[in-house]
Each structure stands twice: as C-alpha cells, then as structure tokens.
Amino acid sequence: MTKILNFHAHIYFDADEIGAARALAAQAQERFGAAVGRLHERPVGPHPRGSCQLTLAPERFGDFARWAMLHRRGLTLFVHPTTGDERADHSDHVLWFGPSETLDLSVLD
C-alpha cells in the first residue's frame, strides 16, 4: 500500500469569494492544524482558478473531511493525498467537495 504523507485541500474561489476562502482557511488552521498556503488569485499549476492550499496531517483528515462537507461556505474544494506520484495524486486519488472542475494535468508531465 502506498504511504500517504499528507493531504492537500485546495480551496477554489473567484474574485468575489476571496473573503470566504480566507475565512475557511483560517478555520481549518485553527480547528485541524492545517498549514495554509498562499492565496493565488489566478490559476496556478493545474488549478483552473484562484486557490489556496491547505496541508493536513493524515490523522486529521477524516475530521477535516466531515467538517468541510458541511462548512465549506459554498466553495469548491479539490482534495488529494501526497504520495510522491503527483500525476496520480491529481487525477486518480482525488475527492471533490462541491462541483468538480477540469485541471490542467499537462503541467505535471
């Protein structure tokens, strides 16, 4: 079985949702010890629009997932493990909270 080092939860947002994304990230940091990355106001890497990455320890992910389902403030979250296989982590090993979106996986080649 492949080891999961951590989980990344990417909060997707549009310009008018930055405040909600910041608030969600702050709550995840406070409640689950999530490391909060920079808010990118435009698409970066494979992500199709503005995003902010949360990094969660594997043992906190289950609690985070249950909470995020009900408290995501209408935002879409793209979630994947970090296993060392970036392509698979971003294509095969994914969860979506909210509508799924199309990633640009060509940047992972």
Image: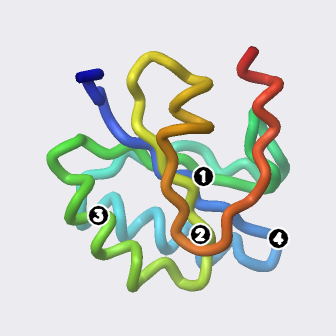
- For the N terminus, the image quarter is top left
Its colouring scheme is rainbow
Q: What's the residue at 26%, 53% (across, down)?
A: 61
* Crowd around label 1: few <14 · some 14–19 · many ≥20 (10 Å): many
Q: Are marks 1 and 2 in contact (CB under 8 Å)?
A: yes
Write down the residue under mark 4: 15
Q: What's the residue at 82%, 25% (across, down)?
A: 106
Q: Are marks 4 and 1 in contact (CB under 8 Å)?
A: no
Q: Find residue 103 and report its horizontal and vertical position in percent.
A: 76, 44
Q: Indicate the amino acid at tag 4.
A: Ala
Q: What mark, if any, has residue 64 been given in the picture?
A: 3
Q: Find residue 85 and report its horizontal and vertical position in percent.
A: 50, 18
Q: Within the image, what quadrant is residue 99 found in?
A: bottom right
Which circle's residue, 4 or 1, is located before the other in the chain?
Answer: 4
Q: Indicate the amino acid at tag 1.
A: Cys
Q: What mark, if any, has residue 40 been given in the picture?
A: none
Q: What mark, if any, has residue 21 been given in the picture?
A: 2
Q: Is residue 44 above or below residue 96?
A: above
- For the C terminus, the image quarter is top right
Q: Is residue 105 left or right of residue 68?
A: right
Write down the residue under mark 1: 52
Q: Is residue 56 above or below residue 6?
A: below
